[in-house]
């Protein structure tokens, strides 16, 4: 294991099957992580929630959830899942807090990959 995967494991990422998906190509994996951290979907999600466009917010959150899962970012994935399920069931009361939680997890992930 490398320093990156060791740190991601401490974060809670599921790196073993993820690295299998990436054919053990850690450079490609890091490139995908960096691209994901800059993904405009995060900004689109925030904008959709601010505009109370919950259908668009659901689509954005669902996309981010899928990418987080494919990248093995379990803590971020689980945090996004909370918002996705709330949006799926039209429970909008805690969307602001759920978005805040997603931002916190995203920052935690970025601190690791930007080292």
Image: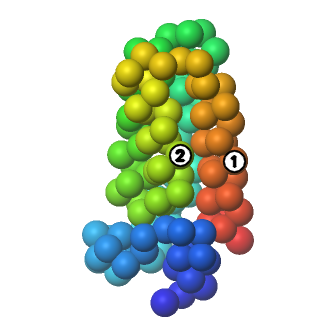
Q: How many marks?
A: 2
Image vertical order of residue 48 relative to residue 25, above or below: above
Disc 2 target residue: 79
Q: In the depicted view, which residue is nearer to us: 19 or 89?
A: 89
Image vertical order of residue 53 relative to residue 17, above or below: above
Q: Which color scheme does this rendered protein use? A: rainbow
Disc 1 target residue: 104
Q: Residues within 10 Å of mark 1 (few under 14, many from 20)?
A: some
Q: Are marks 1 and 2 in contact (CB under 8 Å)?
A: yes
Q: Residue at image x 47%, y 50%?
A: 78
Front: mark 1 or 2:
2
Q: Residue at image x 53%, y 69%?
A: 12
Q: In the depicted view, which residue is nearer to us: 25 or 55?
A: 55
Quadrant holding the C terminus: bottom right
Residue lying farthest to the bottom in this orientation? 1
Q: Secondary structure at mark 2?
A: helix
Q: In the depicted view, which residue is nearer to us: 34 or 19?
A: 19
* Percent x, y of residue 6: 56, 83
Image vertical order of residue 7 relative to residue 68, above or below: below
Q: Residue at image x 41%, y 60%?
A: 71
* Percent x, y of residue 51: 60, 9
* Percent x, y of residue 28: 42, 68
Q: Residue at image x 53%, y 46%?
A: 79
Q: Residues within 10 Å of mark 2 (few under 14, many from 20)?
A: many
Residue 42 is at least partly visible in this image: yes
Residue 4 is at least partly visible in this image: no
Q: Secondary structure at mark 1?
A: helix
Circle on res. 53: none
Distance of label 1 from label 2 (alpha carbons): 10 Å
Q: Upstream in the sequence, badge 1 or badge 2?
A: 2
Image vertical order of residue 98 relative to residue 15, above or below: above
* Percent x, y of residue 1: 49, 90
């Amino acid at each position: 294991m490398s320093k990156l995967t060791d740190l991601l494991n401490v974060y809670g990422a599921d790196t073993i099957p993820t690295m299998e998906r990436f054919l053990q190509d850690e450079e490609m994996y890091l490139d995908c992580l960096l691209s994901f951290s800059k993904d405009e979907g995060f900004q689109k999600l925030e904008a959709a929630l601010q505009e109370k466009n919950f259908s668009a917010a659901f689509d954005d959150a669902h996309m981010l959830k899928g990418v987080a899962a494919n990248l093995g970012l379990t803590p971020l994935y689980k945090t996004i899942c909370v918002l996705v399920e709330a949006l799926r069931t039209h429970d909008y009361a805690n969307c602001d807090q759920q978005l805040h939680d997603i931002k916190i997890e995203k920052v935690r992930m970025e601190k690791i990959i930007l080292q």
